[in-house]
Amino acid sequence: MERLTVTEKRVARAKRLLRDVTPLKADCGALCGAACCRGDEKTGMLLFPGEKTAFAVLTENGRRLAVCPGKCGRDERPLSCRVFPFFPVPDETGRIFAAPDARGAGLCPLLRQIDCVAFDRRFLRRVKTAGRFLARDETLAAFLAKNAAEIAETRAFLRRLTK
């Protein structure tokens, strides 16, 4: 039996925590034809450090992506899929928030109308809880911070476009 690292155990636990929650109480995929589940051999969802997947893995710019086959079992989804369209983001004090992931704005209609959408509070709490748990690991904390910076840059860029 393969022994898991602390990082791998944390990712696996976060995935279990997010197994049975979704952004909306209804199927949000019905709004967009499950756009976030349609990938190709050149795109995918970001894998967290230590995350294992049964999907093909693409490495792009030093980042590992799980290549989406278009349909999968809920328990097979990478952690990025489970938190989408949010991401656990640390603020300057280290507190974790479930922040809208601006990097998915072109894909997810919920991100374009975020002020009018009633997200499931249980989902948002679980994203924050998973983020707090992940942030206790130095490697994962750095990963969250790096992605938080990318999300902030994307949000700023999108604001400049809409001015």
Image: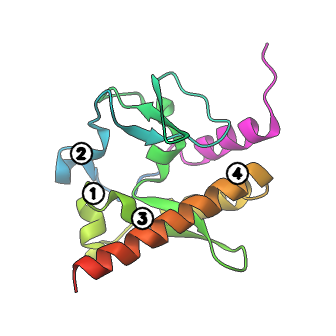
Q: Quadrant location of residue 93? A: bottom right
**Gap in angstroms between the C-alphas marked 1 and 4:** 25 Å
**Which colour scheme appears in the figure?**
rainbow
Q: Position of residue 133 (x, y in %)?
A: 72, 56
The answer to which of 81 and 119 lies nearer the viewer is: 81
Q: Amino acid at mark 2?
A: Ala
Q: Mark 1 or 4 closer to N-term?
A: 1
Q: Quadrant of the N terminus?
A: top right
**Gap in angstroms between the C-alphas marked 2 and 3:** 20 Å
Q: Residue at x 30, y 73 (%)?
A: 158
Q: Quadrant location of residue 56? A: top left
- Give the structural element (helix, strand or loop) at label 2: helix
Above or below residue 55? Residue 28 is below
* Crowd around label 4: few <14 · some 14–19 · many ≥20 (10 Å): many
Q: Magenta stretch mostly in which secondary structure?
A: helix
Above or below residue 27? Residue 145 is below
Q: Which residue is mark 3?
A: 120
Q: Mark 4 or 3 closer to N-term?
A: 3
Q: Amino acid at mark 1?
A: Cys
The part of the chain drawn in magenta is: 1-20
Q: Position of residue 18 (x, y in %)?
A: 55, 48
Q: Amino acid at mark 4?
A: Leu
**Gap in angstroms between the C-alphas marked 4 and 3:** 25 Å
**Gap in angstroms between the C-alphas marked 3 and 1:** 16 Å
Q: Which residue is mark 4?
A: 140
Q: Is residue 159 magenta?
A: no
* Crowd around label 2: few <14 · some 14–19 · many ≥20 (10 Å): some
Q: Which residue is mark 1?
A: 108
Q: Residue at x 30, y 66 (%)?
A: 111
Q: Which residue is mark 2?
A: 35
